[in-house]
Amino acid sequence: MSDPVIELREIHAGYQGDSVLHGVTFAVERGSFGALIGPNGGGKTTLLRVACRILRPYAGEVLLAGLPAASLRQATVAKLIGFVPQATSASFEFSVEEAVLMGRYPHLEGFRRPGRTDLALAEQAMEATGTLQLRDRLLGELSGGEFQRVILARSLAQQPEALVLDEPTAHLDLAYQAEVLDLLRRLNGHGLTILAVLHDLNLAVQYFDHYTLLSGGQILAQGGSGDVLRDDILSRAYGADIAVDRAPDGRVVRVYAQAGNGASLSSIAGRDALGGQRKAPAALRAGEVLPVKQ
Amino acid sequence: MARVPAGKAGSEGTAGHTTPAARRRWFALALAVLLPLALVMAIGFGSTRIPAGEVVRIIGVGARRAVGLGLPVAPGLPPDTAETIVLLIRLPRTLLAAVCGAALSVAGAAFQAVFRNPLADPYILGASSGGALGAAAAILLGLPATPLARLSLPAAAFVGALLAVMLAYTLARRAGGGSPVVLLLAGVVVGAWTSSLLSLLMYFSGRFLAQIVFWLMGGFGGATWRSLAIVSPYMLAGGFVVVTRTKELNALTMGDDAAMGMGVDAERSRRLLVAGATLLTAAAVAVSGPIGFVGLIVPHLVRLVVGADHWRLLPGAAATGALLMVLADTAARTVLAPSELPVGIITALLGGPFFLWLLTRRGYGAWFGGARR
């Protein structure tokens, strides 16, 4: 069973001397379809950045496809893992095709330009994400869902072994959320390993079979829905009274925070309502954990 | 004259009847025709008008002489006035203007990409004022009078420019993790601070004041073949660093994390690109003084026509920048002839309104506020 694409061992990492991850050991098995969940500031994005070697850990070891990440070139890392950061603003006047072709960069040594093979692979990636008909559009003209799919296509053009996504559904409406997650599931069906940070637990339970709960820079729970999505564990992780309603067959119906007055809110709204009472997450201070939006 | 094809293509937008590829071809063709034409016209223009055909003939003679073919041109005749004007005065001057225009435009494009900031240009980030400070300090120290004079001025300007950009970059990095707005503020602060240091130097500069002021006004008045030779190594080095990194430039515009995800070492690439672009800027500033707006506007203008891919943007910006600077310099030395306007006044006069027009274009202003979806 054990053939991890990404393996983190006793990782301590953070920003400017502050620690965000405190000894995280974590593996992403080949072919798995996993969600990384947890409260704001729990270290999810930091974990992804360490896994993609964007952030160097203070201590610990990262193995990518069994190779020590510290000794790899960034281009080699990019061939192993496609990283989809949180959607930032569309930058400059790139066409969709140009943006997707950028996914070929790790495969282009030195000053080489994308060639015919690269274009074919980019077209495949656009085909898979349903963005082929957008190829001549400019990034700035796209809707949020289209933009997210283009970024996904770019990562696919990298031909990675695993795809690591930071909140691929953020800022998307319900239809686009489903569209993106359906696409990820299809890609996983074709053998691509997926690890995604998801904020919306109710959305996560509809798609994912493996969960990793990260809170306070440590992994609180890992496993299937029954191991992770439990009232007691989630309440501890989020520092709020979280309830999980399950159908008789064990399927999760909904996850929600119970506000003091007894009114139940969706998990997102509940967290916002309680946010003020919780300690401000240390990792959010520097504005570095979450990419600074323009 | 340079604006005609670009402006037309820009107003048509991408949804117009021209495909992006056709637009790019027209643009390349227009530049290929207009740039040599502008060079020849510029050389012919002036107090002594020299017909275009004569300019071309003289340049041909000069070129053959330069490569040592020793053409027997009218042996025994007194030196030809037109030949002297073309080969010793106007040709080097026009070429220097072209080279500086190209360098500033390429540097501007690079700065805009690595800082993900459409307002970034060599001047706004403090490279020009830093370079000016360095040059002024060199003048004040009397370096141009030493045997190393011809190299010391560009070198001092380069060091000043590099220090200014590094200072702005470091401040922004510490304050805001590289946010474009913070960077802009840091650049403004460093620019203002550098300017005040410059004022301080000038206040105490005594008999050198006129020399510094004259230098600060910018222009290609004193251009010689030697000035070209002096800046060439700097510009070649800086230009090489930038133009060989079109992939990195493209990736960096997507943000650092995205660039890293594409296999680009963001920090390292940015440092190198900033150094290269600063080298280009500093070399230009050193021989011509600070000339604003070209480095800001030309990349935007060219991006409208050829798109954001730096593989096309950089050559387009270089050619367009060269063309505009040659036209501006020709205007500078002929509009008020026999006296000469500083070319920076002309670029600012034309550049300001153009930039405002750019801002009002549909969708383009959204660049400044972030997402437009």
Image (cartoon, coloured by chain):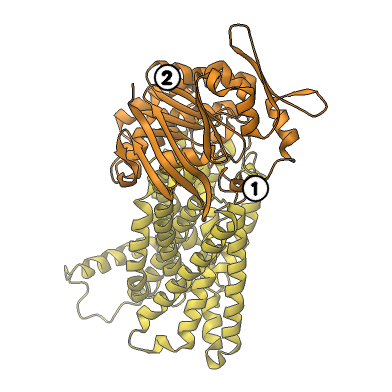
Q: Quadrant of residue B193?
A: bottom right
Instruction: List the residue tagged with mark 1.
Output: B359
Q: Are marks 2 and 1 in contact (CB under 8 Å)?
A: no
Q: Which colour denotes chain B?
A: yellow
Farthest residue, direction bottom: B207
Q: Give the x, y percent position of residue B226.
A: 34, 76
Farthest residue, direction right: A261
Q: Is residue B41 above or below residue B227?
A: above
Q: Which colour denotes chain A?
A: orange
- Give the Cα distance between marks 2 and 1: 44 Å
Q: Chain of mark 2?
A: A
Residue density around tag 1, few if under 14, some if 14–19, many if 20 or more, within 10 Å: some
Q: How many marks?
A: 2
* Horizontal side of residue A139 vs A263, given as left or right: left
Can residue A83 be seen here? The reply is yes
Q: Give the x, y percent position of residue A137.
A: 52, 30
Instruction: List the residue tagged with mark 2.
Output: A188
Residue drawn at x 56%, y 41% is B10
Residue drawn at x 61%, y 64% is B188
Q: Amino acid at mark 2?
A: Asn
Which image quadrant: the C terminus of chain B?
A: top right
